[in-house]
Amino acid sequence: MKISKEEVEHVAKLARLEITEAEKEVFSKQLSDILTFMDKLKTLNTEGVEPTATVLEQTNVFREDKSRASLPVEKALANAPESEAGHFRVPKILEER
């Protein structure tokens, strides 16, 4: 499947990324190659093959939950560039429409 430069531009715009013309060419080819490979994978017979996330045997190691003292607010805010009323103060990131 061929991905056009225009489609790459559209995705970059949605992700709010600025990309150069050279990057558009590279990404277009890379994404096209990935989708072509995915089409190739679709031709394989996977009947009877169990879905898996990994081929390696893995087990989770859990530790017992224990309550413990947390960091005091004053200490947590000590190196913050800005704080207000016991909270971190951060710049507004949502745009007005």
Image (cartoon, helix red, strand yellow):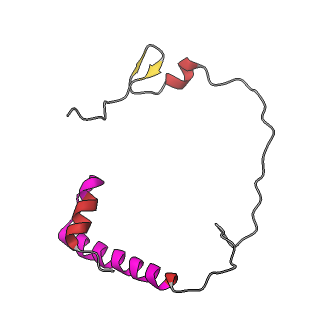
Q: Residue at x 30, y 72 (%)?
A: 27
Which segment is the magenta one?
Answer: 13-40
Quick one: 59 or 49, which is closer to the camera? 49
Q: Position of residue 61 (x, y in %)?
A: 78, 52
- Residue 21: percent from the left, percent from the top? 18, 70
Residue 19 lies in the magenta stretch:
yes
Q: Is residue 11 left or right of residue 87?
A: left
79 horizontally vs 28: left or right = right
Q: Which quarter of the rendering shows the C terminus?
A: top left
Report if residue 17 lies within the magenta region.
yes
Helix, strand or loop for the magenta stretch, by majority:
helix
Q: Position of residue 80 (x, y in %)?
A: 44, 27
With 89 as the anchor, is 43 left or right in this view? right
Q: For the view shown, which residue lies furthest in the right direction?
A: 64
Name the residue at the front extreme. Answer: 47
Q: Is residue 81 left or right of residue 12?
A: right
Q: Nearer the viewer, residue 79 or 84?
A: 84
Image height of 34 relative to 45, above or below: above
Name the residue furthest top: 85
Question: Which quarter of the rendered picture does the N terminus lie within?
Answer: bottom left
Depth order, front residue of 65/82: 65
Residue placed at 27% from the left, 59% from the top? 12
How many discs mark residues in the rendered view? 0
Q: In this orientation, which residue lies closer to the viewer: 49 or 23?
A: 49
* Residue 78 drawn at (x, y percent): 49, 23
Residue 32's quadrant in the figure? bottom left
Residue ID at (56%, 86%): 44
Query: At 26% across and 67% down in the image, what residue appears?
Result: 8
**Residue 63, located in which quarter of the rendered image?**
top right
